[in-house]
Amino acid sequence: MDKIIEFFIVIILLAILIQYWWVLLLAVGIFLLVKSIIGFKKKKTKKVYDQESDTNTVTPMTIKEESSPDKRINVVEVKKEKTTPENIEPHSLYSDKPDNKDVTDKLSFYKDSISAEKNDYTNKIESTPSPHVHKLRRKLTDFVVFDIETTGLNKFEDKIIQISAIKYVKDKKVATFNEYINPGFHIDKKIMFLTGISNNTLESSPTLSTVMPSFELFIADFPLVGHNIIRFDIPFLINNGISKKDISALDTYPLSDRKLPDLKNHKLPTLKKYFGIINRSHNALNDCETNAIVYQHLRDDKLDPVTIEHSNTQQFFSGKRFCVTGEFMETSREDLVDVITEYGGKYTHSVSRLTDYLIDGTQVSGNLTDGVHSSSELKAMQFQKENGRIQIISYKDFCELLSSKNYEDNNIHSQNM
């Protein structure tokens, strides 16, 4: 009988549920929503608890033992302390033996490093405001043209290793300034060959703190002229301690870009060749002299190219092909190419079977073909084995070759007289 009653009750409930299905669906939806909200709150609470637990695990605890009347209760006090080298025992960092002298030295070094970093940060925060740079556009006849050499391109990390300047009054050179600067470390080979400055020169040179006041005294209130100085040289001066509050500057790079828009580029060596300027490169002081002449051409709108006449120069290398690879401490590659063409030689960018001479410098590139030799060197060695036509010579050999040609020419002239 009971089973029959249960059966009829189930049938009645099913009928009710079928008739009011939407009520059942609504109830289920409300139930799921409430359940998800409760689960989310529990998860968030657990995350906060885990973070607090992690924080507490890294804070050292000092345990204080107190006696209760029955001497059975230990009270633990948690005292949060800032974890610094001062409150960490030496043996907890390095060794189980706190009296180890080597360990103490390491800890002392660690503390000194932290202190140095703090001092560097404080110095940056307390540094004086940068000077205001006034970009000039007017024509100048009284100015200081200057140039610097550095250990790299980063104005915050790299160092100045040479400052050169020439002062002009009414367009006449009246004084020069040239100082090498000891950066406090050895510069790498690539920088040496790019700047022509050796470590031996820098080791015996004064520091920047000595040179900078002398340079400021030299420039006085004269406006500065230079090539790409707004983006490179002046930011280096500012980040290396120049104390002038205002700097007036005229940059010949954008000036040349504006007045000679058809040039392939506006680098100083390109402008030097365009205006037919005969002067060495590879040195900041020589670049100042070149830059001053370039500025005068641009200022006075003397913008026509100047061709250097070599009619009086004996064409010793006429019919000879030269290629140059690597870098040279004695000269820049641009100057070397100028000498080749001045004496009638033909310069090519790559080695071929027709090349007569490869002038081989020091390889400073980081992407050499085999890690040691340039592609020009490898081709030259291959052609040398095949036909023996090409000669691989050093810069010294080239100078001796040029000297011998001059000597032969002088002897011919003497015999004809």
Image: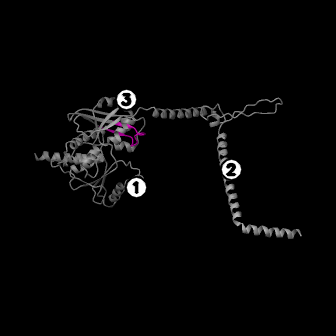
Q: Secondary structure at mark 2?
A: helix
Considering only order in the chain, which callout, 3 or 1, is on the residue closer to the N terminus?
Answer: 3
Q: Secondary structure at mark 1?
A: loop
Mark 2 or mark 3, whichever is nearer to me: 2
Q: Magenta residues?
A: 146-162
Q: Quadrant of the C terminus?
A: top left
Res. 390 mark = none
Q: Secondary structure at mark 3?
A: helix
Q: Percent x, y for residue 307?
A: 18, 49
CB within 8 Å, label 2 to label 3 = no
Q: Percent x, y for residue 411?
A: 16, 46
The residue that appears at 73% across and 34% down in the rendered structure is 76
- The residue tagged 3 is 210
Q: Percent x, y for residue 281?
A: 28, 43
Q: Nearer the viewer, residue 104 or 176?
A: 176
Q: Percent x, y for residue 168?
A: 23, 34
* Inter-mark Cα distance, 2 to 3: 66 Å
Other residues around mark 1 within 10 Å, as few (<14) / some (14–19) / many (≥20): few
